[in-house]
Image: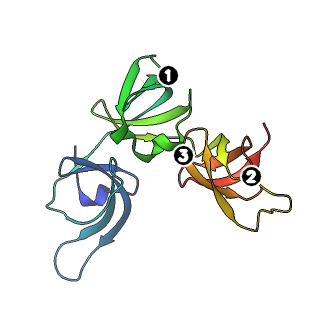
Amino acid sequence: MALSINEVKTGMAILVSNEVYIVTEVQHVKPGKGSAFIRAKLKNLKTDLNLDRTLRSADKIDDVFLDEKKMQYLYREGDTFHFMDQTNFEENSISQSQMGDVVNFLQDNMDITAVYYKSQIQKVYLPNFITAQIAATEPGFKGDSSRSGTKPATIDTGAQVQVPLFIDKGDWVKIDTRNGQYVERVQK
């Protein structure tokens, strides 16, 4: 569906050069001479690359309908990840390249949100926080506090995170999946 530049809003999905972009910022400009236009900041849905674009009233802007589905992670087979749609119980597979960096925090039976465009998965979103067990790290020492620094640790998904010095192997921690940072120690 073609849109006018007045209908472009922050958060909507549009099609630019056959790629799906999310509008992250819109600035309407009405110069003294000439016709109005908008300056838009766009984010590619698949690659997360940012794009600055000037759109004029003569430009054809196509609105895109995105569908979100709740899915559950089942298993991994090589570079393919298998998920179950929680509404109709169909199994879908996603390649590792489509998953991106979220594979570092993917846990067994985790519920995720998949974004579809034309029946193709475009992006996978994990919950903002996960609880993971520390699989390997240097041992902590008595007197180490949360203010004295960090050390590398491997969590049960295989991802490397920085944790405070007092965290030991076997401890449970809360991790922010958006940036891969330690949040707090959790009692399990």
SS state under label 1: loop
Q: Quadrant of the C terminus?
A: top right
Q: Nearer the viewer, mark 1 or mark 3?
A: 3
In this orientation, does residue 66 appear?
no
Q: Residue at x 37, y 37 (%)?
A: 96
In this orientation, does residue 7 appear?
yes
Q: Could you say which quadrant of the image residue 68 lies in? A: top left
Percent x, y for residue 10?
39, 57
Q: Nearer the viewer, mark 2 or mark 1?
A: 2
Question: By what rule are the colours in the image chosen?
Answer: rainbow
Closer to the camera in the image, 2 or 83: 83
Q: Give the alpha-carbon distance from disc 3 to disc 2, as whole Å.
A: 18 Å
Name the kind of residue labelled 3 in the image: Ala
Percent x, y for residue 25?
38, 63
Q: Is residue 108 above or below residue 145?
A: above
SS state under label 3: loop
- Please give the label number shown on residue 159: 3
Task: Give the labeled residue for mark 1.
Answer: 86
First of labels 1, 3 by sequence position:
1
Task: Give the labeled residue for mark 2.
Answer: 139
Percent x, y for residue 144?
81, 62
Crowd around label 2: few <14 · some 14–19 · many ≥20 (10 Å): few
Q: Residue at x 58, y 46 (%)?
A: 128
Mark 3 and mark 2 residues within 8 Å of each other at the beta carbon: no
